[in-house]
Amino acid sequence: MMRTVRLILTRPQQESQLLVRELSGFAAWVWPAFSFRSPSFPDTVHRKLTEATRFEAFLFVSPTAVSFAHSHMPTIPVSVTVCCAGSATARAARAAWGDSIRILCPEGDVAASGSEALWAAMKKTGLPKSLLIFRAQSGREWLSEQLAASGTHVEKLCVYERVPFVLTPEKKDALLTAMEKEEVPIVFLTSTEAVEVFKRVLGDIPGAFAWFTSGVALTFHPRCDLALRQAGFQDVVLVHASDPKAISLTLKRLVCDRGRIL
């Protein structure tokens, strides 16, 4: 008898809803590891952006960082190079500020992206003397440390805040039901921070995190693959494209391989 599968999508709400449309007919929970809100101190953002031209480069940690930054900064100084660790962020930057902006982004698929790849690209083209990182309360710490150690003046600007996932009573009831029915979880998780969020949220419920890690994890990057395995996932699959159609096709294949549609 084939097993029942439960898809758990932990990407941001908007991205996860796009996947839900692609996954019509499949049982999926949208559990974003983080939701986003405007910064608590917007005046700090405005003050920093009045001196934006003194930086040689901007680093945007994610498409979300681009979106929030664009609401405060409708144009980018022509002298600034926009650095992005992945193609999705680069696409968001071009959509926000136009094709004329100068972008530095690693080439290749999703697995070839990330801080290490961007660091290599920056060393190849020449490190900026000064760089402003647009992020939430944290982000790209390793890359920031490498740049600072190499002589780049690095400053960080919180343009949005991340709010970790909260397990509401309704979601908890659904979780306990899935555990009782021994459904097989297939979890789409793409950041090491998200792994920690769910470890913390589910840790107080007996057996919940063990169930969460008992199925399959789908992710983008080898670094997250390692974090997932260290957290307890035995079955981790890498997807090498970030568009919703490619991801949904992989998820559908995993459902067929591991169980059946609800």
Image (cartoon, rainbow, N blue to C red):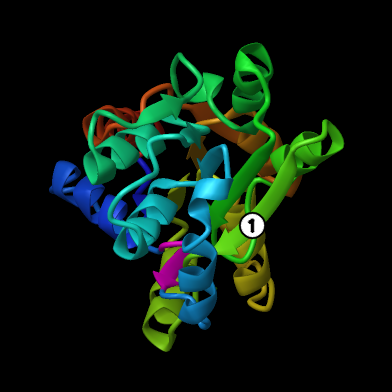
In the rendered image, which quarter contains the N terminus?
A: top left
Mark yes or no: residue 47 visible.
Answer: yes
How crowded is the residue under tag 1: few (<14 C-alpha within 10 Å), some, or many (20+)?
some
- Span shown in magenta: 32-37
Question: 231 or 133: nearer the eye?
Answer: 133
Q: Under tag 1, what secondary structure?
A: strand
Question: 234 or 130: nearer the eye?
Answer: 130
Residue 57 pos. (x, y %): 55, 38
257 to the left or right of 137: left
Q: Residue at x 28, y 32 (%)?
A: 243
Question: 77 or 167: nearer the eye?
Answer: 77
* On screen, residue 71 above or below 248: below
Q: Is residue 54 magenta?
A: no
* On screen, residue 26 above or below 86: below
Question: 239 or 107: nearer the eye?
Answer: 107
Mark yes or no: residue 261 visible.
Answer: no
Q: Residue at x 79, y 42 (%)?
A: 145
96 to the left or right of 254: left
Q: Residue at x 23, y 55 (%)?
A: 17
Residue 229 pos. (x, y %): 70, 38
Residue 179 pos. (x, y %): 49, 65
Residue highlighted by disc 1: 156
Q: Quadrant of residue 260?
A: top left
Q: Is residue 33 magenta?
A: yes
Residue 92 pos. (x, y %): 31, 41
Q: Callout 1, which amino acid?
A: Lys
Dominant SS type (magenta): strand
Q: Quadrant of residue 64?
A: bottom left
